[in-house]
Image (cartoon, grey):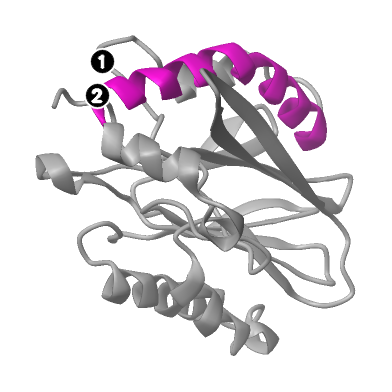
Amino acid sequence: MPFRGILACIGLVILTTQTFATTVLIVFTERNEVYVGTDSLFSDPSLDVRLNACKLHKLGETYWSAATILYADNITGFSLEKLVSSIGETGTAKEKMDRFIKAAEIPVKAEFSAVGEQSPDEYQLMVTGEGKDRRSPLEITFFEVRDGKPSIEITRFFAKESGDHLEWTYEQESYSVTDEPTVTGVGTWLPAYQHMANSLSDIEGNPGKIFTDSLQAVVNAFPKEIGPPFSIIRLNAQGEKWIAPGLCEH
């Protein structure tokens, strides 16, 4: 099977099902701070491909990341990073997400169909799941702190075969000011969420250790798909602070 790119990601949410082997954990607090931690391993076990790279990207004043089987394709030329860059750097996280949804409709659907030709088993997992078993071929998040207020936008795309055509839908989630620490995100998230939920009261005092331990819980559960080094950043009204840059340049 030809190489079709690997996974990317950011975040997690207890309100949804897990997707692919990328973990990005997002915590936002009542002090209007956003903490984000990601792993750095991109892998395709079927091809025995493993490499490490930064999974946090910046577009203007907004950060983004994704969990997806549609990251890059050297056959069709599809590139998620190029698609995101095409929407432009201006506007809020919400405005960027709205533009991305419109820009993604045709190329992402076409790329998913191409995956179906090359990886039919994986394709079938995407189009046949129902309820809790639904799996998204693409989850993406844009997040920022603007004018002192956090904004986290998450969209999960879903595909389903209907007769001889493919139905393409999406679900959006928006998060902002909160009165208590809250965890959300995208990707392979459950072990990290369980650890983080027990440590939220201490998040501002020791975010590096709490995020590292939470992300390591996912590595322990999925050592072939999730891996260090971890990248951890804090956003607030004063700007950004890299608690642990990992492989992300800053």
First reached walking from the N terminus: tag 1 or tag 2: 1
Q: Position of residue 205 (x, y in %)?
A: 63, 83
Q: Quadrant of residue 245?
A: bottom left
- Disc on res. 74: 1
- Count of marks placed on residues: 2
Dot 2, crowdedness within 10 Å: few (<14), some or many (≥20)?
A: some
Q: CA distance from mark 1 to mark 2?
A: 13 Å
- 86 up-or-down from 238: above or below: above
**Residue farthest to the left?**
48
> What secondary structure is the stretch in magenta mostly built from?
helix
Q: Quadrant of residue 153?
A: top right
Pick the front one: 37 or 163: 163
Q: Position of residue 46 (x, y in %)?
A: 15, 43
Is 149 situated left or right of 114 in this image?
Answer: right
Secondary structure beneath dot 1 equals loop
**Residue farthest to the front?**
163
Pick the front one: 155 or 237: 155
Q: Position of residue 248 (x, y in %)?
A: 40, 44
User: Which span of residues is magenta-colored?
Assistant: 92-119
Q: Quadrant of residue 214?
A: bottom left
The residue sitting at 38% across, 57% down in the picture is: 39
Report which residue position mark 2 lands on: 118
Residue 250 in view, yes or no: no
The residue sitting at 35% across, 74% down in the picture is: 216
- Disc on res. 48: none
